[in-house]
Every structure is written in C-alpha cells, then in structure tokens.
Amino acid sequence: MDGQLDRRAELSEFLRTRRARLKPTDVGLESFGRHRRVPGLRREELAQLAGVSVAYYTRLEQGNGQNVSAEVLDAIARALRLTDAEQAHLTHLARPRQQRRRASAGRSQQRPVQVALLQLLESIETVPAYVTGRRSEILAWNRMAAALFGDWGKLPAAERNWARLVFLNPDYRDLFVDWDQKAYDMVSFLRMDAGRHPDDPRLSALVGELSVKSEEFRRLWATHDVKEKSYGVKRMRHPLVGELTLSFETFRLVDDDEQCFVTYHAEPGSPSAEALRLLASWGTDAATSLPA
C-alpha cells in the first residue's frame, strides 16, 4: 500500500460487510425462499429499512458518499444496527472533514508526550501505565509497564508499536493468554484510525507491512470490524510471576485525542495484586526477563 488507503473502497467494503452479517429475520423481514444469493440482507432490503431509494443506497455502497446527509447516514446506521464505534467509522468514511484531512496529511509525525504526563507516568510506581498514539505507537511508559510487558526502550523506535509486537513478535503470543482477542482488538483499533486518517502514509505503510507478514492480520483486516479503545480485562502469562488477571482503563487526552493514557491494575488482595507487587520490587530485573 502506497501513500494512503482508498477511502471509497473502505466505505464500500465496510457497508457490504455490515450488510452481509444481517439476516432478514434479524431486522423483522421475511426471508422469501430457502436459497438466497447473498449472505445477508439484499441492497433492496437495506434501502427499504433505511427509507432511501435502492439507487441512492447502491451509489453509497459503491463508495460514493459525496453530499450524503447526516440524517441518511443515521438511518442507514440504524438499519444496519451499527455500534457507536461503527457509526462513527461510517461517518468518517462517508463525510470526511476537510480540515481533519489537511491536518492528517500535514502532520504524519506524532506529537511529543507532554512533560507533565511524562512526570505523572514516572510518579506511578505500582501500576503499569503507558501512552499510545496514532497507529498504535507506544510513546512513553513507566517502570512497571516495562516490568510487565518488556523494556520497550531496548527496541528501535519504529518497533515500539503494539500492532507490530502482537502480530510479528511470537513472544507476545505467550504473554497474552487470550492472544486471539488481543489481535482482534488491535486490528479493530487500527481500522478506526484508518477511518479518521485515510490519507496517513505511515498508517498505510504499517497496514501493508502487517498484511504481507501476517496471515492473521490480513484475515482480521478483511472483516472491517472497528472498535474504540476503552476498558476491560486481560489475562497475561508472565515468565517470572505466572498468570495475572488485570483490568485496564483507557483515557483519551483532552488536548490531543490521538494520544491515550492506559493503566493496568489488579483487584486488591488478589494473587494478581501480589504478582504486581513482586514485579514492582524487582523493577529492572523483571523487565530484562521479557522479550522486548
């Protein structure tokens, strides 16, 4: 992939895959006949549900989102039963804001992490925390994050990237007990970034590299699933302290919504909390035992 992702192709494939996952009975329509030539809803059925003409919807699914109104997009989102993240992604693809596109094209370099945030990271001594940017780049981290995930400081800057680590570093398959879910989430996050910044050449290059080097990435990318970073639970298998169950929280920065502050914590009094305490006491020694 060179230069940028094809926004029209992205819009077309996104709508097609969302339509394909719905059955007529899912949306209150009768399924006429046992044999249907499409895996999900027909274009005619989707247009009927959204209250638009078949020709209009067909043009949109062919990637022509020019002049489509917010009201029509809302109607199509409801008909397709899109999640909030999926609806936002549809809007990014169909109605890209010119000012965002100009900013994206003119600023492919990531903004530096604010000094105050770096100081905050350093002051957090018992909770793994890090800052990520666009394209899943790892921008900054504290000592506990290095103890849990590995010392990213030993990696070249280009390799400090969650997507590359998850798909191209086999040791991270061992680190994440539910690696398949981690991989799915990673691709879904990148899809959201691609919708916001389809003209980002570095993002396009990353997607191209991972598509060539990882069959699993290529398969997940083709699903066109999207997801916002939020919160949840991850299970990890650390080489020094064994299995941990940690809750994570993601906070998007107010003055730079491309950067996220992520923390991991354990339930107080749990074996995972004791494992984190041990990692904190070992510090640098724990970090050197990990793949990065």
Image (spheres, helix red, strand yellow):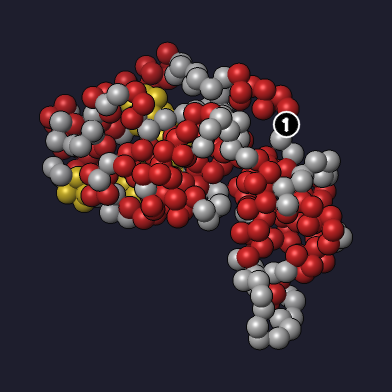
Q: From what the image shows, is residue 77 above or below residue 192?
A: below
Instruction: Report the side of 59 relative to 26 (left or right).
Output: right
Residue at horizontal 29%, vertical 32%?
145
Residue at the spot of label 1? 97
Instruction: Report the side of 3 relative to 215 (left or right).
Output: right
Q: Is residue 125 visible?
A: no
Residue nearest the observer in this picture, 284 or 70? 70
Place of residue 212 in the rendered image (x, y in percent of width and height, measured from the top left) = 40, 44
Residue at horizontal 56%, vertical 42%?
192
Residue nearest the observer in this picture, 145 or 23? 23
Residue nearest the observer in this picture, 155 or 28? 155
**Quadrant into which the C terminus falls:** top left
Residue 166: quadrant of the picture: top left
Place of residue 250 in the rendered image (x, y in percent of width and height, measured from the top left) = 46, 38
Q: From what the image shows, is residue 151 above or below residue 190?
A: above
Residue at horizontal 53%, vertical 56%?
223
Q: Is residue 50 visible?
A: yes
Q: Residue furthest top?
A: 115
What is the total number of numbered labels drawn onto the structure image? 1
Q: Residue furthest bottom?
A: 34
SS at badge 1: loop
The amino acid sitting under disc 1 is Arg
Q: For label 1, count other residues whose C-alpha is less than 10 Å away and answer few (under 14), some (14-19) or many (20+).
A: few
Residue 30: quadrant of the picture: bottom right
Residue nearest the observer in this picture, 75 or 210? 210
Q: From what the image shows, is residue 59 above or below residue 46?
A: above
Residue at horizontal 15%, vertical 44%?
239
Place of residue 184 in the rendered image (x, y in percent of width and height, measured from the top left) = 43, 52
Place of residue 189 in the rendered image (x, y in percent of width and height, measured from the top left) = 50, 43
